[in-house]
Image (tube, coloured by chain):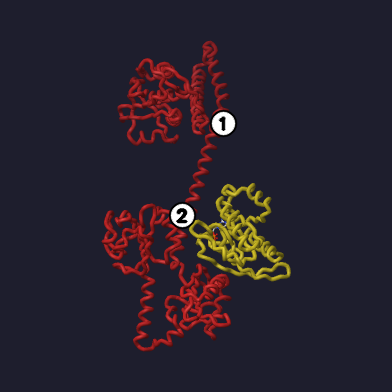
Amino acid sequence: MLGAFAVGKTSLVQRFVNSIFSEKYQTTIGVKIDQKLVQTGDTEVNLMLWDIHGEDNYQKVKPSYIMGASGYFVVVDVTREETLGVGLNLQKMANEMSKGAPFIVLINKTDLPQSEWYISETSINELKDKGLEIILTSAKEGTGVEEAFSRLTELMINK
Amino acid sequence: MLKDLPLKIVEYLVEEIPPYSGLLMIKVDNRGVVKNWKGNPKEYLGGKLTENESIEELVPALNGICPFDKGSVKLTKLQLKNKYCDIHVVKENGHYWIIFIDQTREVDSLKSLLQNMNEEQLKGRGNKTNSKEMPFRHLDKLNFATFLRKDDGSFSLQPNTPGWIKKHAFYNKASGSIDPISTFPFLEIFILEVEEFWKENKESYVVSETWSETFAGKDHYLRAYATNLNNSNYLFLKSFIREGVEEQNLLQAFRDSSLAFDKLAKTEKKLKELLVYKNKFNSIISHDLRAPIAAVLGVVNVLTTDEEEIGKLNEDYQELIYGIKDEMNRLLDYNNKLYHWANLELGNFKLEFETISLDEIIKIATETAREKCNEKNIALTINVEAGLKVRVDKTLFLQALNNLLSNAIKFTPISNSIKITAKKDDDKAFISVVDTGIGMNDDMVKNLFKESTNNTTQGTSGEKGTGLGLGIIKKIIEAHKFKITVKSVPGKGTVFTIEIPESNLA
Ligand SMILES: Nc1nc2c(ncn2[C@@H]2O[C@H](COP(=O)(O)OP(=O)(O)OP(=O)(O)O)[C@@H](O)[C@H]2O)c(=O)[nH]1
Ligand SMILES: [Mg+2]
């Protein structure tokens, strides 16, 4: 899970693994690793989910965390425009470190009213046109979460 | 405590200092003279701190280290009055921040460790061979689990295992061990770095980043360390509680406040957009209302000017029609003000400057006001210095003067007087409207130009107001880059003065 701070990386993992959501923001210290068994087709895959602390001026994501990744999510907060730039920068770094592992951009917190969206549909479509795979999610309501994880699993297996 | 610290210091706090249980920061100049501080000096230094005092006298340990410009300073586990501290000195923008990092807790736990070791030595149990076999056997007291790397690359947990690791589901009670790498997937990556380090066989150590694990229903924050001793490779795992990772709490505080700030900024932006929307709305509505109001007024005017026609109506109907006329006039006036107001707010008005004599423009304004003055039997005197010419937007400036005058009339009791003067003084021109009305107290004067329609006050003859008049005056005057001031004495009257700079005099 890569992205700026407070975009919802931990919340997405918790929604996926434990089906829970908390409104309280507790910033992730370092790294938290969770596991979940998923079924794709006839294959059972054990996903090791690395929930990495958010990136900002004070805390940079260590490239070595990504080295062994088979795939990754770039998480963006739809209500904070700047998180898109942070995410895309991390993606560049991740792309090098992981030697082109598959990834999906998650536009999170889409349960919040459209009036608070600062990443417009147009810019989302622009990203899609550039060939990025994008899924709108809400860790709070669970929207798109299962889909996101199974899609990434699929991409990783078929690679 | 943190929000007004310079960025460089904040970064330093987050990145460079060890886990701590408290901080004192003192800002000094390069001679060690105290400028200011954050935190509680008394807790650390045992006494009060005052500005301009010398830090060397307060903290003898810093003697000889000042001036600081020799380079960065880091002192460890220094005993101060009441605490053990690490002291770091950081240069920032010509000053120095001396950071006292409370390490009392760490030292206390080390103390008991040393105490134990010494006691064992005294009892003769701690002979050399023994300590060679188990060189780190007391580290469990600091929550370290010690692993020795065996030749086959696996790890064996050394005796004196700290409590936390025994609670892990993968801890094997029978063998008294646990495999660190498969238990903590985080180590899969750290171990790559460590293997390199072990190959070099250096006598230092490496530390991992922090990671977290939940087991036995508790959050554990872990760090791994690796070192070499006597040709053996050791791996340590230390468990912290979240509070033990104090620099991270700092991070939490920062992120929380950064999110809050974000929200505020967005709300502000939204409010501004709403305001613009409101003004556009007003502008459009008031513009479109003009025509129908004027049409009704036109009909009423026809009715009331034709005396023969209106004479045919009985008195009640006549009164009704005059009532409609008055109300329609008021509505038109209100609507005009609304229109001007909204457009001024939107910045839609481009001023069209022309040169005009003050005498003339004031004459036009007073003519409009004269009728209302007569109604209240108010004497209006004019005193304008001859030959003064100003560059103004005639329509707007006239509107401002009209508003000033009708305001004065509104608040002046029947049979009192109003004066309007204009004169040149010190290269500037001053236009004053002086009334002998009810006046205002300081509070009212202060709030006078605030954009609130709640501020409407009834006139001395019950005149109703829009609450927009003064706001419009201010907007117009500011658009001209002129100044307007108010002086008022309750019960005596009010003076509004417009100041026109030399650049707008011709
Ligand atoms: N409304 C809404 N809030 C969310 C959603 N996802 C996360 N949040 C909230 O956003 C805040 C941050 O969520 P986290 O999951 O801790 O974010 P993070 O990316 O792990 O943050 P760091 O660990 O600091 O990098 C929390 O207050 C969550 O409750 C979502 O889908 N909708
Ligand atoms: Mg997190």
Q: Are marks 1 and 2 in contact (CB under 8 Å)?
A: no
State the quadrant of the C terminus of chain A.
bottom right
Using the rendered view, name the quadrant where residue B494 is placed: top left
Q: Nearer the viewer, residue B191 or B340?
A: B191
Give coordinates of residue B368: x percent, y percent.
44, 18
Q: Which one is closest to the eye, mark 1 or mark 2?
A: 2
Q: Colour of chain B?
A: red
Among the chains pictured, the one given yellow colouring is A
- Residue B485 % position (x, y): 36, 30
Q: Is A9 in front, or is B409?
A: A9
Please state which amino acid type lies under the numbered disc 2. Answer: Ser
Residue B426 x/y as whole percent: 33, 24
Ligand 1: which quarter? Answer: bottom right
Residue at image point 39% right, 66% down: B21
Residue B8 x, y percent position in the rendering: 43, 55
Characterize the local packing of mark 2: few (<14), some (14-19) or many (20 or more) Cα atoms within 10 angstroms. Answer: few
CA gap, disc 1 and disc 2:
41 Å
From the viewer's side, name the closer residue of B389 and A159: A159
Judge from the rendering whether residue A48 lies leftward or rightward of residue B106; answer left or right.
right
Is residue B167 positioned above or below A55 on the image? below
Instruction: State the residue position of label 2.
Output: B257
**Mark number displayed over residue B284:** 1
From the viewer's side, name the closer residue of B328 and A136.
Answer: A136
Tell me which chain the residue with mark 1 is part of.
B
Secondary element at image label 2 = helix
Q: Residue furthest bottom?
A: B124
Q: Considering the numbered disc 1 on the image, is that residue within a helix, a strand or a loop? A: helix
Q: Image point 49% across, 74% down: which residue?
A: B226
* Residue at horizontal 58 percent and vertical 53 percent from the top: A84
Q: In the image, which disc is placed on residue A89? A: none
